[in-house]
Image (cartoon, coloured by chain):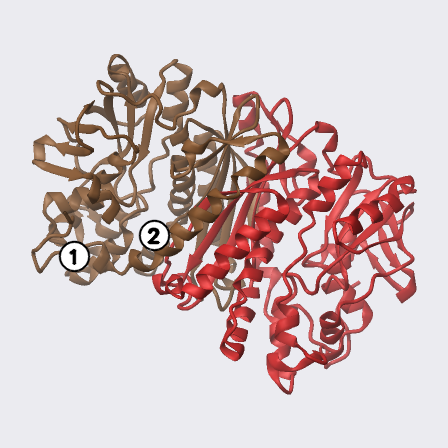
Chain colours: A red, B brown
Amino acid sequence: MSSSSTNPGTLSYEQAGVNYDLIDPLKVAAQRAAAATAGHLSAHGFSEVKASRGESAYVVDVGPFYLASIVECLGSKALVADEMKALTGKSYYDGIAQDTIAMAVNDLITVGATPLVVQAYWAAGGSDWFGDAQRAQALVEGWKKACDVCQVAWGGGETPALAGIVEGGRIDLAASCTGIINPKTRLSVGDALAPGDAIVLLASSGIHANGLSLARKLVERLPNGYLTEVVPGLSYGDALLAPTTLYSPVTEALAKAGISMHYCANITGHGWRKLLRHPSRLTYRIQAVPAVPPVLKFIQQHAQQDDREAYSTLNMGAGFALFVAAADAERTVEIAKAQGIEAIVAGRVEAGDKQVVIEPLNIRFGDDDLQLR
Amino acid sequence: MSSSSTNPGTLSYEQAGVNYDLIDPLKVAAQRAAAATAGHLSAHGFSEVKASRGESAYVVDVGPFYLASIVECLGSKALVADEMKALTGKSYYDGIAQDTIAMAVNDLITVGATPLVVQAYWAAGGSDWFGDAQRAQALVEGWKKACDVCQVAWGGGETPALAGIVEGGRIDLAASCTGIINPKTRLSVGDALAPGDAIVLLASSGIHANGLSLARKLVERLPNGYLTEVVPGLSYGDALLAPTTLYSPVTEALAKAGISMHYCANITGHGWRKLLRHPSRLTYRIQAVPAVPPVLKFIQQHAQQDDREAYSTLNMGAGFALFVAAADAERTVEIAKAQGIEAIVAGRVEAGDKQVVIEPLNIRFGDDDLQLR
């Protein structure tokens, strides 16, 4: 079953220019080669947590605790910031910095890790990128502020000028993040996930940093481009550039409250299909959906996507999914809200086929829907 | 005092297109903001090793051991691989993969860390980059092989297609690396460096991955471009593409042999001025220089650089400097050789002005030479 619509006006993610058929064979070869290196850890007296292969962060057992690490890319969201800067004169790079850190931190925490150190990777198309003091300062300040929110130390990083590799006037942004899982019982690679668990969805702030290829492509269809209003007083560009929510304050607060995460999914590039991430055969029954941010409603409408296509591509208001014991569900929502992040108990895990059933919208995603990419 | 030559035919690093005057204000602002985040570690019961700020890798005290992390960029060496592929049909990306890992690993080990996990950051200009199966396979195989040499686990990574940010047909390569310093006595941030210590220089394999802007610029002056012979049977392009030596087998073997590194310097972008990296006021007296790889001799000659300019820009045969107790010097050389890496006892640390004195070449670099870049 494919997630593609048959409506000829529909703009799908694939049509927006990312061809996974070309990337996937490399990914498979790389994953195979990477898995074959795990044995090296034994030379140092350590071992990998095998279940973390294929999860969002890689985990190594170093004895007293687990070590988790990751590198993540912002993607193409900075291109929207550049377009909007040209239109409004405003620098959006403080938000872009937060987006970049969020890509790394929100993935790292899915395995139960406390993020400790972030490293910055800012590869510009030329030295002159850094010569725009306002923009550079916004990037630095936003990066620092996001580190403050996540209580993570900014260790350092790289600021290469890569003329000939990165396009002139552009910047390739990424972040690496290292954390520890301590106590080791915080490890969350899905062993504890079981029928009866509650699914708590944490609100997103908008598109976050996934689906931007589609969102940028859509601009061609809009009467006023990025300045087209999503709701009165809010332009499409401004709405897209809402910084990604940082979820580590929630996962840290949960740990402090003694609530165990049975599993997590950072809802990114595959929309709600990410709820199928866990390898087990389980059904995820959704009985309540969160409010959809105006910019995502707007994209769905202008890209002529049906609900199925929209929920299979975009986060539709749910940026992060927490799977917890049913008894902990309401307290999990309260703890998230105390951190300033809206949350709902959206549904439950059930025995049954591997599928997500979004009852209020009459959508079903099966196992093959996530395999597709 | 500047490192620039007054010979009008000389090609300097700055002339090759990297303008540090534009990057440096951002770097300073970023370093200041980063330093201000260190306090967050206390929320998790940890603290930074302050002396690691400004060193090649960032170090955190996590109790039973230290944690070190880094992200590093390959730079522009892949552009040479692309040019040579067009000329010879050969894929050089296995070597390029090793270069990228070396950039991260060789920096991480300077603080005394054992590299444990490498993450790959491969950002291509479009999905089609990954469609060249021979090249993609070479990248994967080279990456795996370098991990094998360093006994490091390849955790995973990112393979984004970033059309509009990375140039079409190009790839932006970087690696993050996480390691631990265990036992904690292995921490090497320079506290132990003292007059009387020996300076051991480990051989480089060629230009490594620094100075490539200059090396690429130089091609315009060569009769046969990248195919100009450096020595009979070895083209300039092939010589440039010799993969960077991985030094972690040496530092690990030294630790096993009980030899303490008082300090290390990975000799990269500033040539032998990197010997001045340590913050103390000390004199580094060099009495023997290693053999210069033919490609570096060739660059020096064709860029019309005097020895001073060449040694201030390129590694000139010394890829990594180890500062050890004089009594350990000969054994350090033997251990490096046992790992297949040439090494010499090149000189000693003395009380005195902050300077490098290369006696055989009558060169002196003072403190201001490293500030200048």
Between B108 and B275, which is closer to the camera in this rendering?
B275
Q: Is residue B59 above or below residue A25?
A: above
Q: Residue B270: x percent and y percent?
A: 26, 44
| Residue at (82% x, 56% y) in the render | A366
| Residue at (24% x, 43% y) in the render | B370
User: Where on the picture, by quarter, is residue B260?
Assistant: top left
Label 1: few (<14), some (14–19) or many (≥20) C-alpha neighbours in 10 Å: many
| Residue at (38% x, 28% y) in the render | B189
The answer, for residue B252, to whether it is visible in the render is yes
Of labels 1 and 2, earlier in sequence is 1
Q: Is residue A73 above or below residue A249?
A: below
Disc number for residue B11 = 1
Between A69 and A96, which is closer to the camera in this rendering?
A96
Label 2: few (<14), some (14–19) or many (≥20) C-alpha neighbours in 10 Å: many
- Which residue in the structure is indicated by mark 2? B77
Q: Is residue A150 left or right of residue B20?
A: right
Q: Is residue A361 left or right of residue A58?
A: right
Q: Residue A342: x percent and y percent?
A: 79, 56
